[in-house]
Image (cartoon, rainbow, N blue to C red):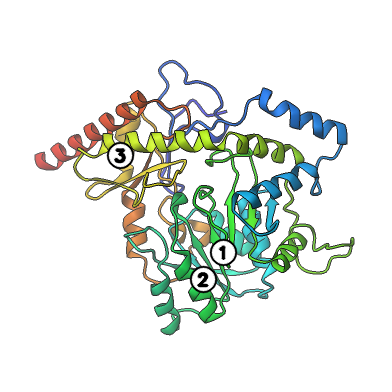
Amino acid sequence: MPSRESHLDVASGLIAPGDVAGDSGGRRPGAPMPVMRPKLPSTRQLVPYLRAIEERRSYSNSGLLCQKLESELSRHLHCQQDLVITAASATAGITAALLALDLGSNATCLMPSWTFVATPHAAWAAGMEPFFMDVDRRTWALDAAEVRRALAARLCAPRAIVVVSPFGAPLDLTAWQKLQQETGIPIIVDAAAGFDTVRFSSLISVVSLHATKILAAGEGGFVVAPTAEMRDRLKSCSNFGFLGSRVAQRRAVNSKLSEYHAAVALASLEGWPATRLRHLQIASWYRKGLSPIPGVALQPGYGEGWACGTTNVLLEGDSAESIGRYMLREGVETRMWWGAGCHLQPAFAACSRGELPQTEFLAAHTLGLPHFPDMEKADVDLVCRVLGKALRSRASGRRAS
């Protein structure tokens, strides 16, 4: 349950009380508006799936519900065959994907520093060394042309590249597929928050089903393979290196999804059309409410035909940390979702990296605003008013000094 004591942890980018992933109830009287309030399917919606689990007494190891979920997700993505592999988390899915590429130990994996720490953790778990590269301010993502130039300049020699979909935003998959084809370097799409924008392609893609994501299983994820051969390698690397027997054929992890999490995901998938429309509605309220406020820019492309589960703004002239602190005093939680960038996290401080000016600017000026499925327009209006008030207060303070 969330702590009752508010705190600010700059290193992790947290400006919120406690762990919001566990918040399943309404707001306490006088409590701040939460930055996120996850909502999973109801008990009533889960009962048929739970009965099926009870009848079969099959709880894991690619049970029937996991198989059904993989088939449903393959159809959702318009795969020609079942090419989706469920995973215990997106982090475990990325690790399994890197292991399936069989790149060897201590190989370099190029990725943005502007991402959640799960991305480099997954590389480390696969025995690879992260190399952090800067993102493009226009997209908040790695740019394929810049990566190509870095390769030509021998800034690094990656054996794999992980490109991150920032907060679920769509990527230029054509450019990344071309880069993979031309260089032979395998590319993985970390689309943890990108259920609405992930697309089947010649790249491996990984999506999270965490409770805080737009389509949720409580915990879990899935990997989209480009071919049946890669699907089979991924299945093996997700299940102790087994494939067709109980003999470990390769380095692997145990990242199988349980039948219970598959049940929640299937129930969530049933309600996906309504869920998607709800998040698009919240985005439209924010686009209208924030448009008159000077010095505030929404994430590039936010609300333009794709749905996401977070609302992030760029405060061009203000510190996200100080504005977040002010808003919390006014009863609105915020969060700096990706903190200061992975390269400044103690765990990754020794990792190799290029120059990161855009990452450091985004880290200092990007603030996550409240966004949750049962949010109403009045809630969005309140957030916009408090943000405007915070910015005016900061501007008055600067003039006074």
Q: From mark 2 to mark 3, how far is it between C-alphas?
A: 32 Å
- On screen, 278 above or below 148? above
Residue appearing at x 75%, y 55% in the figure: 254
Q: Amino acid at mark 1?
A: Ser
Q: Nearer the viewer, residue 204 or 152?
A: 204
Q: Secondary structure at mark 3?
A: helix
Q: Nearer the viewer, residue 95 or 280?
A: 280
Q: Which residue is mark 1?
A: 201
Dot 1 or dot 3, earlier in sequence:
1
Where is residue 186 drawn, in percent x and y? 58, 72
Graded by Cα atoms within 10 Å as few (under 14), some (14 to 19) or many (20 or more), the crowding at tag 1 reads some
Residue appearing at x 24%, y 50% in the figure: 316
Q: Which residue is mark 3?
A: 287
- On screen, 149 above or below 387? below
Q: Nearer the viewer, mark 1 or mark 3?
A: 1
Q: From mark 1 to mark 3, how far is it between C-alphas?
A: 31 Å
Q: Residue 177's mark?
A: 2
Q: Secondary structure at mark 1?
A: loop
Q: Secondary structure at mark 2?
A: helix
Rendering quarter of residue 245: bottom right
- On screen, 248 above or below 320? below
Rendering quarter of residue 391: top left
